[in-house]
Structures are given as C-alpha cells and as structure tokens.
Image: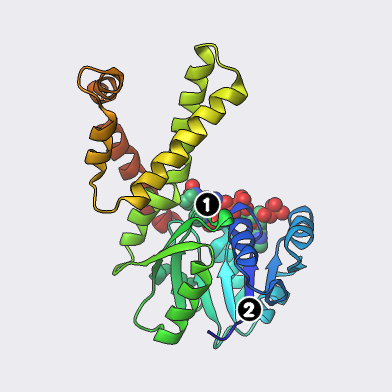
C-alpha cells in the first residue's frame, strides 16, 4: 500500500493513542502531522514519536492527503468551517474519529464534501490493541476505504459496519468500553485493598486476571463466553457465589442500560452539534 501523508487536527488523548500505535507499527513519523492550539501535547508528540507538529490547523490540513478530524464533537462544526474557508480539501480523504457526528452531518460541515469516513477507535490503539469501527458512504471509493483500514490496522483491529447508526453500537461496545473495564478493575482493586492488600499487589492481581481473561477469550473463539465462565465456576464454590451476587444485583441489566445510555448520548450529540 502506497503511504500517504496523515494529518491529525487536534492532538488530545485519542489521536495520541493512534499516533503512538502507528509509529510503533512502522508508519513513517515524517508522514504524520498533528495540529493543536497549545504546544505541550505537540511537544510531547514530537519528542516521543518524531512526528511533525504545528499550532496551525490550516498548515496541518494542507500537508495531509488524509485529514483525521480529532477534535471534540462540540467544536467539530467550527473547526470544519474554518478548514474549508482556508484550505483546499478537494481530493483529500476527510476522516472523523468524533463520537456522535454522523456521516451526513460531517459532509454538511465540510461544505457538502462527500469523501468522508466516520470511524470510532479506542485508546488501546496506543498499544496496537485498538478496535476501530468504520463506516463510509458509497461516495468513498475502494482505494480510500482500503487505505484508511490499512492505517487503522496498524493500531489494532478494524470492523467495517453497514450503516452509520451501527457506529453508535461500536461506541457502546468498543469506543467507550475500555472505561467500563477500568471502572470494574478499579472497583476490584479497591475491594482487594479493603481486604488488606497493598495497592500495588491489588493492582497486580486485577490487571493480570483481566489480561489473562482477555487472552482466553481471544484464544478460544470456538467457546462461548458463557462456557469460559462455566470453566471457572465450580459447583458449590466461590465463583458461583460471586456470580450469583452479580446477577442478583442485575449486572446484565446494568451493562445493557449503560450501553444504551452511550448510544442515546451519541444520538443526542448528532442533533446538538
Ligand atoms: N478518548 C477516547 O477514548 C476516544 C475519543 N474519541 C473522539 O476523539 C476526539 C478527541 O477526543 P480526545 O482526544 O479524547 O479529547 P481531548 O480532550 O484529550 O483532546 C482534545 C484536543 O483538542 C484540542 N483542540 C481544542 N480546540 C482545537 C481546535 N480548534 N483545533 C484543533 N485542536 C483543538 C485540545 O487542545 P488544548 O489542549 O490546547 O485545549 C486538545 O488537545 C473526540 O471527538 C472524541 O469523541 C473517539 C474514540 C475514543
Ligand atoms: O466519551 C466519549 O464521548 C468518547 C467517545 C468514545 C470514548 N470516548
């Protein structure tokens, strides 16, 4: 695949995670530019990954063949307006990583520009363990689709979805979900500490259990998740008691409500911004 120049507009947590994974995955840092209003995040990106940085969104946009719009959804409209007023975006592939901005809305923000891809990555991209959902309208050709998937495959796995709405499911299941798992891990760490464990020891127990469990899911695709759980759950044993406690307290219903809340918020954001 022929390399192209990538420009990130906005240099916060998510683009940093992607840039980190890209450079670790062998993407030439000299082909990557990031812009941000303030310097500190740019300085860190330059120092850590050797990419090109600028405080000018216009300069970054002009430099990129692929422009990755990485600002908060709230300022996406103003950012796009400013870009189309000052830069020639014709021919560029414009990619959004923002939650809640539909492809239709993005096209509109870019002056009815149709070469757009909506993506939803997650922060494990920094370790090349990311999960990114992608959606593109028919106006985006196969070459561009393949290229953006090639880029994001540097930072983990990718999944094309068939409809714009399905990106909201990607948000609930993969974009936001690292935070759910960190919350779960934190609650377990806190309880292990309450039981007398040191903070470091509690973290080790929890992180290794999560890592091992994730690996077991990945390495046993033929086993349902319920079967993996059953393998841990001895009859009359400790796990059974813990699982019953989760289920008596409606864990599944809580997860369902939380994911629906994320999807609902994405829908609201599409209307608000
Ligand atoms: N964090 C995550 O896990 C995920 C985030 N996303 C999406 O990624 C996008 C970015 O989120 P995230 O990186 O977490 O946000 P952050 O809050 O970490 O970063 C936002 C960045 O935007 C910069 N910024 C502010 N105004 C402008 C502007 N006018 N032009 C260019 N940059 C600007 C800020 O600069 P300064 O510091 O100088 O104010 C800051 O560096 C969002 O749209 C979000 O929905 C998608 C998937 C996962
Ligand atoms: O919380 C958010 O809105 C963003 C999108 C997915 C993860 N973080």
| 28 sits to left or right of 165 | right
Residue at label 1? 124
- Relative placement, left or right, of 20 versus 112 is right
Q: Residue at x 57, y 69 (%)?
A: 68
Q: Are marks 2 and 1 in contact (CB under 8 Å)?
A: no
Residue at horizontal 33 percent and vertical 54 percent from the top = 169
Report whether residue 6 is seen: yes
Give the vertical position of 46 relative to 197 (above or below). below
Residue at the image position 43 percent from the left and 40 percent from the top? 212
> On the picture, is 162 further left or further right than 57?
left
* 137 and 178: which is toward the camera: 178
Residue 145 occupies quadrant? bottom left
Front in this rendered view, residue 236 or 172: 236
Circle on res. 85: 2
Mark 2 or mark 1, whichever is nearer to me: 1
- Within 10 Å of the Cα at label 1, are there few (<14), some (14-19), or many (20+) other Cα atoms? some
């Amino acid at each position: 695949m022929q390399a192209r120049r990538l420009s990130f507009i906005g240099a916060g947590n998510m683009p940093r995670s992607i840039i980190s994974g890209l450079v670790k995955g062998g993407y030439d840092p000299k082909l990557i530019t990031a812009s941000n209003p303030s310097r500190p995040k740019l300085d860190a990106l330059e120092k850590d990954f050797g990419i090109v940085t600028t405080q000018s969104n216009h300069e970054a946009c002009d430099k990129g063949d692929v422009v990755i719009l990485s600002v908060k959804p709230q300022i996406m409209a103003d950012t796009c307006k400013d870009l189309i007023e000052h830069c020639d975006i014709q021919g560029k592939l414009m990619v959004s990583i923002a939650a809640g901005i539909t492809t239709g809305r993005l096209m509109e923000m870019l002056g009815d520009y149709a070469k757009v891809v909506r993506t939803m990555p997650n922060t494990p991209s920094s370790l090349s363990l990311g999960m990114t959902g992608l959606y593109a309208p028919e106006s985006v050709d196969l070459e561009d689709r393949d290229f953006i998937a090639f880029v994001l495959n540097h930072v983990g796995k990718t999944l094309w979805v068939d409809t714009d709405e399905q990106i909201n499911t990607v948000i609930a299941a993969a974009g936001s979900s690292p935070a759910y798992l960190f919350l779960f891990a934190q609650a377990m760490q806190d309880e292990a500490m309450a039981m007398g464990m040191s903070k470091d020891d509690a973290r080790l127990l929890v992180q290794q259990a999560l890592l091992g469990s994730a690996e077991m899911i990945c390495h046993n695709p033929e086993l349902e998740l319920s079967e993996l759980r059953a393998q841990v759950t001895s009859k009359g044993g400790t796990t059974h008691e813990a699982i019953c406690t989760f289920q008596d307290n409606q864990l599944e219903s809580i997860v369902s409500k939380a994911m629906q809340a994320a999807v609902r918020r994405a829908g609201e954001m599409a209307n608000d911004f």
